[in-house]
Amino acid sequence: MIGITSYGAYIPRLRLNRMAIFQHMGWFAPAIMMVAQGERSMCNWDEDSMTMAVEAARDCLRGMDKQKLDALYLASTTLPFADRQNAGILAAALNLKQNLVTADYSASQKAATTALITALESVKGGERDNILVTASDRRETRTAYFYEMWFGDGAAALAVGNQDVIAEYKGSHSLAIDFVDHYRGAQNQYDYVWEERWTRDMGYGRIIPQAVEGLFDKLGITMDAVDKLVYPCFFKGDHRKIAQMLGAGPEKLVDNMHEVCGETGVAHPFLMLVSALEQAGPGERILVCGFGQGANALYFEVTDNIRKLAGRNGVKGCLENKKTTDNYQKWLKFRDLIKTEMGIRAEAPTQTATTVLWRKNKMLLGLVGGKCSQCGTPQYPRMDICVNPQCGAVHTQEDYEFADVPATVKTFTGDMLSVSVDPPAIYGMVQFEGGGRMMADFTDCELDGMRVGLPVRMALKRKAVDKERGFVNYFWKAVPLPGASVAGAEALRFDDRVAVITGAGAGLGRTYALELAKRGAKVVVNDLGGARDGSGSGSSTPADEVVAEIKGFGGEAVANYDNVATAAGGENIVRTALETFGRIDILINNAGILRDKSFLKMTPENWQAVMDVHLNGAYFVTRPAMAAMKQNGYGRIVMTTSAAGLYGNFGQTNYSAAKMGLVGLANAIKLEGAKYNIKVNTVAPIAASRLTEDVMPPDLFEKSKPEFVSPMVLYLCSETCQSNGEIFNAGLGYFNRAAVLTGSAVQLGGPQSPPTVEQIHQNWKKIDSLEGARPLDDATAAIFDLLTPPSAESEAEADKAAGGDVGAIFEGMQSAFNAEAAAGVDVVFQFNISGAGGGQWFCEVSGGNCVVESGAHPKPACTIDMEAADFTALMQGKLPAMQAYTSGKLKLGGDIMKSQLLEKLFKIG
Ligand code: NAD
């Protein structure tokens, strides 16, 4: 069988918020607002197509014997050298053997798929057994251009061969059509792009369907035989339209990653294919298309081997490891779009002596040091004499590759004086596991996230660019492992802590497991692997996959497949932690199933199944876990409740009851665990998962990744968290506390005369009121509170309403007016404020004056719709305008650009 045997991806950690481009350049090119959603990936200043290709190739080679490769292809239109084989640099960086065919594929956006077809056909022809095809692009655009928004930077790699095939190659079809939608002249830095409409209609819209139909004819299949459809097209609407044209439903279309990454040029069909493979199961059929002066279409069928693939970053891992910036100047500087004064030190010569480069090629490009064949001590650089003072043997060094050896920070400093594109320059000593140290630059990190002992991995980066001679010099730098480096004093680490997470094979639990492991915890990944409703005998795959992912980034984890809903299962989950890691510090009761039915249709079986997993499951796991925590005098437990339990939800009586039961369980455990420093808190998450895919609206589903919940759960698991017995709602990046509140007591009747029903009726308003209601610590406090009603004066105090007065804000608006900023400004703002205290007001600014009146203006230039509370927060300076806008709290109408004047015209806050 011939086909793809492995895959890997690399998307730079930095993302540029597209709104930041609009904020800085919208004054000049307002239309770019139309594509300003989400973020684009952006190379760090020391990254380019070569460094990204190296990372994608290394990701792809995980678990493979790289010396079995007999060819290496690199596809890109942004290669660093026009005449020095770029694939050769890649081979040196990967430290591959020399009897290897290397080739660069370039000059078209379809170069990667062309290289892939060539590789597959030469394996099929029996000439070679294993070929690595890598694609990478970092395209440049002028500032304030649509393409600055659309493009992203990234790389991906695919290994093809005839053994352990994960996606069988079924055939391909190619079209060569000299259709010039854009081009980049040999002497030019930027693409010249023809009209978009033409590119969309005549290019993507015709050529991709033609290639796909050609492939269908060749293979005698139809769209029915395709489960996933991959083709790049950065016009979102047209991306969907082409699928429709081909008769493919939206479920088949693989996302073009506009919101999260942008279009990565030659690499994009590969990146999308990697993303499709990550989600694919055995038997799924994938059609991939590359577009550019014609098109290539390839057809694959996924095999069972996909399940055996070693853990890797892939697209998923890369998308999770990100740092988003709003710093547009940084973007401009990193891309060399603005010139800054670099100082005299930057004038030091950067010429590379190619003689030295040749002599030290393995050491510089392959990070190859030496290992003493007598005492086994590794060292970098390799030298004639062993550095071990007890050994000192001469000429005993053998090649030793450091690139994939786990390492940590031994020392570091941040230096504002050294020349750096991104000061401070951070550098120091790296300590390799098993021996060996080197001085290295640290990159993809911030100084306040650095610490001694931080786990790092080595990565090839640009060391310097010699513009005069057109030479790029590469060397290895140290990069903190994803999630390992967290800003300064607040860095919450879980080193040496042991965490048990139930139901961690998917959804929220998986994310908790990954995030805890990234921060140093040793994790027991429990998952039964059953169906959504808990039926079936289960599967070890979900837990195993999460463990492989954790090990893939150097973390520690063990899988457990027990059922939480049995006493023996609970005991065994805890035993797995104790036997593997010797202790247990953290327990997250997260496993869950759903069996929704309206109450009258709720069978005892469905009632019991849900009780068993959620409520009884938490009991079965928590009891042995708490016993072990008590021994250590430390523990953090998180229960998972739900809005359905806290507030009610139609059709979920079993689930709501079980989830509220967990709150009761936590209420009692908080008291019993307190003296052993065991704290229990409860989270009510909202996240996209298989439990919610059919109950959540699709647009909300997209925005509600478990990563927007997990920070709260990690905080509740941390030593820093001192809260006990509290409940928190968490979802989409929003958090608040929920609690059982008790209102003020009302005393009726007298010592000898019980109250009457009529007295209850007469006092109903007071009894029913939650005015001044509070959470109470325990049952005793509640009884005490009931028997000690507040005095008459304190009730009067509580009557004074707190909060902002919208009317008063508009009354004060005139005095907040900044007449100087209003010169030449002629505008009417209409405010429509909803909720308590709301109403309509307008501000008319003209001739340097401002008039504020209630009511609706007949011709407002710009309308502003907000909730009263949000408006008050905005005007008090507590809610930034941009945040209000992007979160949907501030809705603008009419000439929305005029709204930017508001902050200038009025002194807000
Ligand atoms: P999910 O289905 O993706 O994950 C739940 C995991 O629990 C699955 O991997 C499943 O195999 C595992 N599991 C089920 N029964 C098990 C058992 N008996 N033993 C061991 N493992 C078992 O769902 P999710 O949305 O990630 O849910 C996680 C938790 O959060 C659940 O308790 C759920 O009720 C709760 N919750 C989720 C949401 C939400 O919006 N996703 C809202 C409220 C509450």
Image: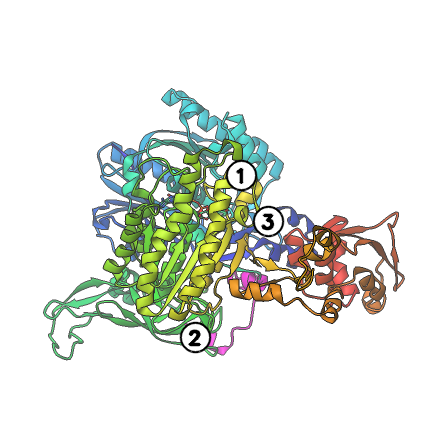
What are the residue bounds of the magenta stretch? Answer: 327-349
**Is residue 537 something that shows in the picture?**
yes
Between the residue at mark 1 and the residue at mark 2, the CA separation in whole angstroms equals 62 Å
Counting from the top left corner in percent of width and height, residue 559 is at 29, 51
The residue carrying mark 1 is 695
| Secondary element at image label 2 | loop
Q: Counting residues from the N terminus, which is met first, the one under dot 2 or under dot 3?
A: 3
- Disc sitting over residue 846 in the figure: none
Residues tagged 1 and 2 counted as in contact (Cβ below 8 A): no
The residue carrying mark 3 is 37
The answer to which image quadrant residue 781 occupies is bottom right
Residue depth check, mark 2 versus mark 3: number of the one nearer the observer: 3
Q: Residues within 10 Å of mark 1 (few under 14, many from 20)?
A: few
Q: Is residue 549 above or below residue 411?
A: above
**467 or 447, nearer to the observer:** 447
Between the residue at mark 2 and the residue at mark 3, the CA separation in whole angstroms equals 42 Å
In this picture, residue 892 sits left or right of residue 19: right
Q: Counting residues from the N terminus, which is met first, the one under dot 1 or under dot 2?
A: 2
Counting from the top left corner in percent of width and height, residue 875 is at 74, 63
Kind of residue indicated by mark 3 = Gln
Q: Counting residues from the N terminus, which is met first, the one under dot 1 or under dot 3?
A: 3
Kind of residue indicated by mark 1 = Val
The residue carrying mark 2 is 348
The answer to which image quadrant residue 844 occupies is bottom right
Residue depth check, mark 1 versus mark 2: number of the one nearer the observer: 1
Kind of residue indicated by mark 2 = Ala
Residue depth check, mark 1 versus mark 3: number of the one nearer the observer: 1
Counting from the top left corner in percent of width and height, residue 802 is at 73, 65
The colour scheme of the drawn protein is rainbow
In this picture, residue 745 sits left or right of residue 340: right
| Secondary element at image label 1 | loop
| Secondary element at image label 3 | loop
